[in-house]
Amino acid sequence: MLELLPAPPVDPLWDLAAEYTADPRPERLNLVLGVYRDHTGITPVMAAVKEAEIRLAERSDSKEYRGLSGNTAFNRAMLSMVLGGPGTEALTARATAVQTVAGTGALRLLADLVRQTRPGTTVWISDPAYVNHRPILEGAGLLVRTYGYGAGMLDDLRAARRDDVVLLQGCCHNPTGVDPTAEMWEELAGLAAANGWVPFVDLAYHGLGDGLAADLWATRMLAERLPEVLIAVSCSKNFGLYSDRTGCAIVVGSSRQALRNVETALQNAARTMYSMPPEHGAAVVATVLEDERLRAAWLAELDVMRHRITANRADLVEHLRALGCAEQAAPLARQKGMFSMLPLTPDQMRRMRRQFGIYGTTSGRINIAGISAHRIPFLAQGIAASLETPHAVPSV
Ligand SMILES: Cc1ncc(COP(=O)(O)O)c(C=O)c1O
């Protein structure tokens, strides 16, 4: 039987990461995957997470199955983080949350919900998009169309029809690092209201752009103004829980009554794939968010991470300017979040990989959160040399 299996496509990001691992050059730089590293090059367990884990280990006395929606305290905490706050009772009353296997699981369960609601629905994704958006949506049996990302996105999205779904990244767009302006978000809300399409917001980097509240602003605004919004939340980056696979699918409906079948539909989708999500990461997040002191400690750590990312980007821009690449550095200065899009062609990206061992994606994306500050001059020199700027001579 297995000889019938056709060669499947290889995940381009993990393929590059494997190429990096096999690269013997000690000076090589891995800027492929979206993983935060501190100044020592380590992806740390956040102190608030560690403390929550210790508390959980001390009081843990059973690993009995949880319910099909996962950890309900976590689901409440996610709803409150994304949509809650003073005066939002009416909004949270028309929203429901189900724990998922990280952000990817949330995207997939929500895509499945869309398919169960209306098979053959068209979902619009940005071009360029996060590499896994199209495979997840097509894997759930949905049709995918693209809108050009940037200033022209509103024009493209005028073609989205009633009951189409439009996937938007809530903040820190992957891969470009550029988000719509507040005015564009308002226009998007107006367009969705006028034409009847449903926003599907992917939240993977909240807290790492302009701060937690600012990064959640657009999602909240859409949820407040529109009758239906789907939200996929990942705790991988902002809690550093990458391998604990922690996330949440949130559905906002026009009323509590409109949500009556949603939780069961999401549960059923999960039931046939993995039954129910793993407990550990969700219990950690709930413990952190429910305890005032731990929550404040987590927010402070998140701010430290955000400031380090911002400082890395500013430093790279400065070094590029010093190497005579002011023009190429200008768009980088406006980007935010973990990723930056370099103004390099696929050939130049390959050249940078081959010649200097600097690994970004072929499309030009680098993880700006994955580099130690002392390696930024090397990165800037590699970029400048790949652009064939005369001043640059890379040295480790
Ligand atoms: C835009 C976006 N959405 C979702 C995810 C999925 O994250 P998770 O690891 O939580 O599944 C990622 C991960 O890189 C991402 O960049």
Image (cartoon, helix red, strand yellow):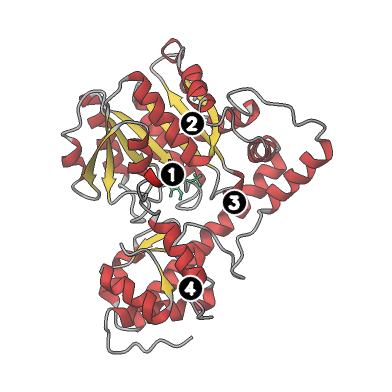
Disc 2 versus disc 3: distance between alpha carbons?
19 Å
Residue 345: % across, % down: 25, 69
Query: Residue at (47%, 41%) from the top-left corner?
Result: 104
Q: CA distance from mark 4 to mark 3?
A: 21 Å
In x, y percent, where is residue 384?
A: 32, 80
Separation of residues labelled 4 and 2 (CA atoms): 34 Å
Relative side of 143 to 296, left or right? left
- Residue 2's tag is 1
Q: Is residue 158 left or right of residue 107?
A: left
The disc, 1 or 4, on the residue closer to the chain's N-terminal end is: 1
Q: Which residue is mark 2?
A: 249
Q: Amino acid at mark 4?
A: Leu
> Mark 3 and mark 2 in contact (Cβ < 8 Å)?
no
The residue labelled by disc 4 is: 29
Image marks 1 and 3: residues in contact by CB distance under 8 Å: no
Q: Mark 4 CB in 8 Å range of ligand 1? A: no
**Labelled pair 4, 3 in contact (Cβ < 8 Å):** no
Whole-angstrom CA distance, mark 1 to mark 3, is 38 Å
* Residue 240's disc number: 3
Q: Position of residue 34 (x, y in %)?
A: 47, 57
Q: Examine the rendering and report whether any part of residue 82 can be seen.
A: yes
The mark closer to the camera, 4 or 3, is: 4
Looking at the picture, which amino acid does disc 3 mark? Gly
